[in-house]
Amino acid sequence: MKPNPNVLSKRLGEEMVLFNLDTDHFYELNGSAARFWELLNAGSDDAAVRQQMLAEFEVDPEQLASEAEALMASFRQEGLVTGDE
Amino acid sequence: MSNFVAPTDSATPPVQLTRQGTICESIETLALLRLQFQQQHYFRLPHLIEPALLDVVQKQIDHGEFYERVHTRIDSNKELCLRENAASAALLFLINDEKFFEIIQQLTACETIRCFDGRIYRANPGNGHHDSWHNDIGDDRLVGMSINLSREEYSGGVLQLRERESGETVSEIENVRAGDAVVFRLARSLQHRISEVTGEAPKTAFAGWFKAQPHFSQLLKQPRS
């Protein structure tokens, strides 16, 4: 999965603000979700993102996997990411 | 009028607003732009908007709705204004970037920029869309900028700057290539206007001001009017 090229993002302090040009919708991501998007947007694949998140956040792998899956499902639903996993 | 023109049409844009943020690769050109602003009160930023993004923005404009807007404080200036949509939101999102603000501050020596606010307008030839001399001072405005978003090359629609006291024209600036921007000085001693659009094609542009306040985070989170 990769970020939709028509999604613009900007870090505002602890938040990441996303704007989807296709749908004219704004999103605000906080904390770990903001970091997740930042890593994804920097070109890391899903596995590399999860590995980096494990290194940066105190979370066990199962919990991270579950939360990452839920986050990616939301991103897909909102058209923020494109492509096959 | 000075004939100084900064060589800004090289293959590498001095500054570009992209999906990855503001990219600035030509420090040497920026020095020339700063000098041009000192001497002529404006400079051009070729290809300011990344071409692929410009294409998406133009498509959103094509689907947008324009309404007639009359500026009662500026001699009843008339223009068609785009109801805010994804195109204007995307441009505000791109321009309201701290790195870009720092570059503009360096080039214009203005005070700290905290936001850019603007609107997309269209001037059709022969429809009485006109502009009169004014200076845009007030409301924390620091520096003006106009970005060409037109699909076709238009005639007329030239940005003119003049000395307020003498009425002497100091610069006349054409900006006919889509994605290019013109940044110009706002001062009590200067006035500007846009000449009437002639020929067949309309002029579509995103125009507004770098401002001392509010902080751009407030603009990006503001609900649409």
Image: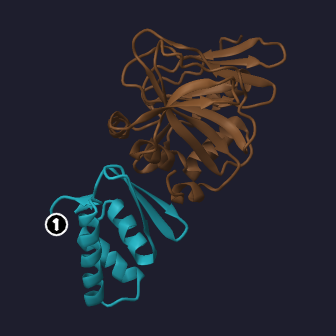
- Label 1: few (<14), some (14–19) or many (≥20) C-alpha neighbours in 10 Å: few
Where, by quadrant of the figure, is residue A72 drawn?
bottom left
| Residue found at the very far right of the displayed protein | B165
The residue closer to the viewer here, A39 or B127, is B127
Q: Which residue is mark 1?
A: A85
Q: Amino acid at mark 1?
A: Glu
Q: Quadrant of the N terminus of chain B?
A: top right
Query: Mark 1 — on which chain does it sit?
Result: A
Q: Position of residue B71 (x, y in %)?
A: 63, 30
Residue name at image x 67 percent, y 20 percent: B132
| Chain identifier matching the cyan colour in the rendered picture | A
The answer to whether residue A85 is left or right of residue B153 is left
Q: Is residue B29 visible?
A: no
| Chain identifier matching the brown colour in the rendered picture | B
Q: Position of residue B99 (x, y in %)?
A: 57, 50
Q: Measured along the vertical axis of the image, is residue A4 above or below residue B169?
A: below
Check disc 1 and report its element: helix, strand or loop: loop
Colour scheme: by chain
Q: How many marks?
A: 1
Q: Position of residue B23 (x, y in %)?
A: 48, 44
